[in-house]
Amino acid sequence: MTGDLGDLDVLRGPGWVRLLRAARRRLESSGGSVTGSVGVGVPSDEERRVVIAVTGRHRPPDVARVSVQLSDVDGWLRRSHGLGLFIRLRRGARDLGQLIEKSAAA
């Protein structure tokens, strides 16, 4: 388990993008409470595999929608990366902002 920001790369992959966007919206609407679930319609194979990894439950390749409890995402991030969902999204946004600033300055 690591806590450095370099391990955010996996969370920028195609399997995570829509899921984390949905998680961010849910956290913003709930005042940061890691409750409820989020889902992705017509998931890509990468998205389906992320949900399988997070939940430990298989989803067939032709599934129309995948959903996951925010608490499951939070737990997976804590076990895998050392920080929970709220902190990861906050740090990820800060990190992304710093990268944008650096590219604009170059």
Image (cartoon, rainbow, N blue to C red):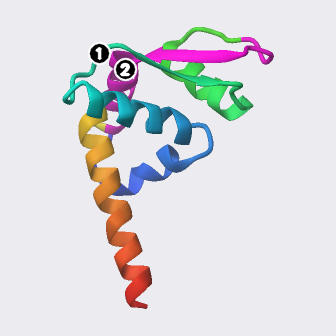
Q: Which residue is mark 1?
A: 35
Image quarter where the C terminus lies is bottom left
Q: Which residue is rendered at x = 38% and y = 89% of the image? A: 105
Q: Pick the residue in front: 9 or 100.
A: 100
Q: CA distance from mark 2 to mark 1?
A: 6 Å
- Region in magenta: 60-81
Disc 1 packing (10 Å; few <14; some 14–19; many ≥20): some
* Residue lying at the far right of the rendered structure: 62
Q: Pick the residue in front: 72 or 21.
A: 21
Q: Which residue is mark 2?
A: 70
Query: Residue 7, how many percent across, how many down?
Result: 41, 50
Q: Does the rendering let one see residue 76?
A: yes
Answer with mark 2 or mark 1, whichever residue precedes in sequence. Answer: 1
Q: Which residue is rendered at x = 62% and y = 44% of the image? A: 14
Amino acid of disc 1:
Thr
Element type at mark 1? loop
The image quarter containing residue 78 is top left
Above or below residue 11? Residue 56 is above
Horizontal placement of 28 versus 42: left or right? Answer: left
Q: Verify whether residue 103 appears in magenta.
A: no
Disc number at residue 87? none
**Disc 2 and disc 1 in contact, CB within 8 angstroms:** yes
Amino acid of disc 2:
Leu
The image quarter containing residue 23 is top left
